[in-house]
Amino acid sequence: MDNTPKTLVVYFSHSGNTKRIADKIAAAVGADTARIETTVPYTGSMNEVSAQGKKEVEAGYKPKIRPLSADPAGYERIVVGTPTWWYTMAPAVLTFLSSTDLSGKKVIFYMTNAGWPGDVIRDMIAAAPGAEIVSTKEILFDSAGGNNMITPENEIDNWIASWK
């Protein structure tokens, strides 16, 4: 009998790096995935999106998000992934965490960044009162903003195996 908790990986990804990790986790643990999408998509150059993100973070803005493709209430374990936006989680992830009751759920947080991790994990934990935080992980990509992952694959595999 399989005692693996029913798992949902919820993530926001603008560049694709956080999605890459979400897909890796889902494949390793047999999880479902649900992408957080804002009702008004971010558009423009990376610099324009970055400037908009900075304004949103500084204002504590919580953009409206579309309903997820899966309801977190039906899962025992929730993995939440975010890119780092101005030293914290992306505003869309703040919206998700602020509007979703994770009390009593086993929760794993991960964040992707390009060398400036800030307080992302601490902020995510603070936004999930009542959740049982099982594990957290910072995953580093190159500082040029590309998709070159600096954190070794086997380190991520070992992290997943530690809570799988």
Image (cartoon, grey):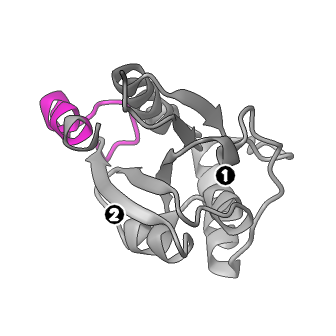
> Which label sits on residue 117?
2
Q: Residue at x 61, y 68 (%)?
A: 54
Quarter where residue 63 is shown: bottom right
Q: Residue furthest front?
A: 1
- Answer few, some or many: residues within 10 Å of disc 2's Cα (few below 14, many 20 plus, some between 14 and 19): many
Horizontal side, residue 52 vs residue 79: left or right: right
Q: Earlier in the sequence, mark 2 or mark 1?
A: 1
Q: Secondary structure at mark 2?
A: loop
The answer for how far apart the CA atoms under marks 2 and 1 are is: 21 Å
Camera-near label (2 vs 1) is: 2
Q: Secondary structure at mark 1?
A: helix
The answer to whether residue 49 is seen in the rendering is: yes
Q: Residue at x 86, y 46 (%)?
A: 39
Q: Residue at x 45, y 25 (%)?
A: 23
Residue 59 % position (x, y): 70, 80
Horizontal side, residue 103 vs residue 43: left or right: left
Say which quadrant the N terminus sits in. Answer: top left
- Is 152 contained in the magenta span? yes
> Which label sits on residue 25?
none
Q: Residue at x 21, y 42 (%)?
A: 159
Q: Name the amino acid type tagged 1.
A: Glu
Q: Which residue is mark 1?
A: 48
Quarter where residue 144 is shown: top left
Quarter where residue 44 is shown: top right
- Answer few, some or many: residues within 10 Å of disc 1's Cα (few below 14, many 20 plus, some between 14 and 19): few
Q: Name the amino acid type tagged 2.
A: Pro
Residue 38 % position (x, y): 78, 47
Residue 47 % position (x, y): 59, 50
The answer to whether residue 86 is seen in the rendering is: no
Q: Magenta segment, which residues?
A: 142-160
